[in-house]
């Protein structure tokens, strides 16, 4: 099977403030992702997880190549949609439905009935049917993240890039959204890259898990051996958790 995402020799350095020298965050990172994979990315704070996703999204300049469906990416596009931890990623002046329709319009869809059909269907999938005319300030944090997810899936991107999207939610809402995201991943047959600090979340969601270490090296890259639905009682859960934990805290 050919990769949907191919990262070759990705190197990223940031210029140090007030100085001429640079600090390297990622050094020759190579990663290949197959279609339909749900790749969870673990790694200590500051190791370059967000930087890696931002490079894939086309938000940063970098050295190396990022190929999506075999095509060299040179900037942002609606084939790669990023979802952030921050609840304020929606346009506050647009209603829920207009937020979702914004990207669709960028994709060239102009017909109002078609826009409405797609945004209604996306909202149904995230259990927010009936909230079409709400503004973001009228929604809870969990509901805002649901809209961000609906907005992303509505565009049918090749890859959804998620940067700790559930990290700021309470435990109950987080568990609910994890389940819904897994269902969406199955139904919509999409490829997801998902950053998390939570090992249980990575094992619960991921079909494959990588651990990045400081310096941007991939120190673990494994297919998830634990069958879904995952609980801490699942056979093999303990040893896999320990392996990831040890790599993370090495
Ligand atoms: N715009 C920037 N300018 C300068 N340095 C940056 C910039 N963005 C990130 N960095 C640096 O790059 C390194 C990696 O940052 P990044 O945000 O990718 O880490 P992370 O793995 O996502 O961490 P966390 O888990 O805390 O979110 C950090 O040392 C950070 O200071
Ligand atoms: Mg980050």
Image (cartoon, helix red, strand yellow):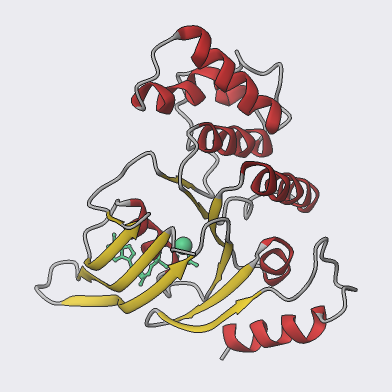
Outermost residue, right side? 233
Above or below residue 199? Residue 68 is: above
Residue 94 x/y as whole percent: 47, 18
Q: Could you tell whether 64 is left or right of 49 in the image?
A: left
Residue at 48% x, 33% y: name it.
Answer: 155
Residue at 59% x, 32% y: name it.
Answer: 147
Residue 44 x/y as whole percent: 52, 76
Residue at 43% x, 75% y: name it.
Answer: 47
Residue 202 x/y as whole percent: 66, 67
| Among the 4 quarters of the image, the one containing residue 71 | bottom left
Q: Could you tell whether 194 is left or right of 232 in the image?
A: left
Residue at 67% x, 18% y: name it.
Answer: 131
Q: Is residue 122 visible?
A: yes
Image quadrant in which the C terminus is located: bottom right
Q: Could you tell whether 158 is left or right of 107 in the image?
A: right
In front of the other: 45 or 242: 242
| Among the 4 quarters of the image, the one containing residue 60 | bottom left
Above or below residue 203? Residue 58 is: above
Outermost residue, front side? 1
């Amino acid at each position: 099977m050919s990769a949907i995402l191919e990262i070759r020799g990705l190197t990223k350095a940031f210029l140090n403030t007030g100085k001429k020298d640079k600090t390297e965050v990622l050094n020759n990172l190579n990663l290949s992702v197959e279609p339909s994979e749900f790749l969870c990315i673990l790694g200590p704070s500051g190791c370059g997880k967000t930087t890696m996703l931002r490079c894939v999204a086309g938000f940063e300049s970098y050295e190396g190549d990022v190929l999506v469906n075999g095509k060299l990416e040179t900037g942002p596009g609606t084939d790669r949609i990023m979802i952030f931890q921050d609840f304020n990623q929606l346009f506050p002046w647009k209603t829920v439905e207009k937020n979702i329709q914004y990207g669709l319009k960028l994709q060239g869809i102009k017909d109002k009935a078609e826009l409405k059909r797609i945004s209604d269907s996306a909202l149904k999938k995230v259990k927010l049917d009936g909230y079409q005319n709400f503004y973001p300030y009228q929604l809870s944090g969990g509901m805002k993240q649901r809209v961000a997810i609906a907005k992303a899936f509505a565009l049918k991107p090749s890859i959804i890039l998620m940067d700790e999207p559930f990290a700021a939610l309470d435990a109950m809402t987080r568990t609910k959204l994890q389940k819904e995201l897994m269902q969406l991943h199955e139904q919509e047959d999409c490829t997801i890259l998902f950053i998390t600090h939570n090992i249980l979340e990575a094992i619960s969601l991921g079909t494959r898990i990588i651990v990045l270490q400081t310096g941007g090296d991939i120190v673990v890259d494994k297919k998830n051996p634990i069958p879904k639905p995952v609980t801490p009682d699942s056979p093999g859960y303990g040893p896999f958790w320990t392996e990831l934990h040890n790599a993370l805290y090495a």
